[in-house]
Image: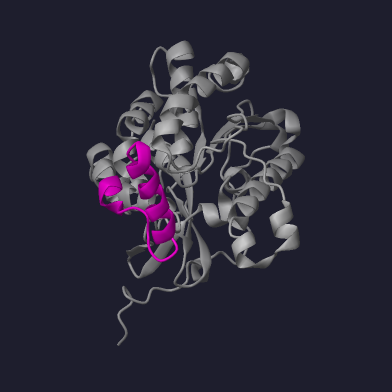
Amino acid sequence: MPDASRHPPKRSSGALRQRRVPLPWPKDRDFRILSIDGGGIRGIFPAVFLAGLEERYLNGRSVAGCFDLVAGTSTGGVLAIGLGAGLTAADLSELYISRGGEIFPPPRSGLIGRLQIWARTICSYAGYRYDRHTLMQLLHERLGDRKFGESMNRLCVPSFDGRHGEVYIFKTPHHPDFRSDAREPMTKVAAATAAAPTYFRPLEEGGYIFVDGGVWASNPVMIALVDALSCFDIPRERIRILSLGCGDDPYTVDREKIVLGGMFAWRDIIFAAMRLQSLNALGQAGLLVGPENVLRVDAPANHKEIKMDDWRRAKEELPEAAREALQVWGGRVADTFLSDPATAYKQFADDTLSEREK
């Protein structure tokens, strides 16, 4: 007989064939969503922004306690899982700033550094830039052996299954239909969503091949919104969304692409796909719940793009950008999302991961 663990079924084979039965939701309460984009080490921006909210409006308490659902992709998924594990955004921002260079070692200065950058670029065409070992060590240090189903928040974390060529969304057991991911280690889910092509090797676990969720959902706002609408009996106008980006870098078609064409000229087209997916998702969310109910906070476009693995520039520039964004948006975020704790969440899982109240 074939080994089911080595050849698991498609994720879609277990999909419902009828409409999901929504759970009741208090008629007098908003449903508050936090959505965090992917962006590598540029996750410093949303981490510092959220840490600023904790310091300014919550007396240091975790911002996670104010949201009914948190969705995150790639670095945003790591942040979402960390919040679900009970870490504060301040904990996570300190981790990114102080130890991000262990995951993405910066090149040395001078000629040697330029040679290192050149070598990494060349090697990335025929290998992976970084070893996942350091990332996994840091994840284990902070998340321990916690299971995904033990999260204190409802979570949606996208990845991509390369074995079957399908989307794969890890979901906490916040609905009776969501039980299959409860026992997954948080470290595995974090590594699965953050397995960025060319940066890290795909994660091979349980017979699946996980690749970074950013290849199809760099901005997970619609994943969160669809989950909320399908799982709970909520009027659309009562949904409030805080969407955090990791840097707004416009993608334009230059003369090289127009004139030369070919794979080399269009080698960075994935970044266009990621940005356009984000813009489309935000537009769709606004159409469904009203643009006034979707608050987008992002780092401004930089004259020189901060690369997803440029820890040195990210830690030097993005904290200040986050503090500036807090000055602009902090009051509105506090009024809309932070005025009272989120509704307690019931887990639907087995006896070892039974009902938990936040």
Majority secondary structure of the magenta segment? helix
Residue 291 position, x and y percent, is 74, 33
Residue 161 position, x and y percent, is 46, 65
In the visual, does 283 lie left or right of 313?
right
Apparent side of residue 287 relative to residue 225 in the rendered image (left or right): right
Model colouring: one colour
Q: The C terminus appears in which quarter of the rendering?
A: top left
The answer to if 117 sits in the magenta stretch is yes
| Residue numbers of the magenta segment | 107-136
Question: Do we see residue 214 in this rendering?
Answer: yes
- Whether residue 245 is situated above or below residue 280 in the rendered picture: above
Residue 146 sits in quarter: top left
Taking depth in this image into account, of 308 and 135 the one nearest to the observer is: 308
**Which quadrant does the N terminus fall into?**
bottom left
Q: Residue furthest front?
A: 111
Percent across and percent down for residue 192 are 39, 55
Rendered residue at 36%/33% (across/down): 96
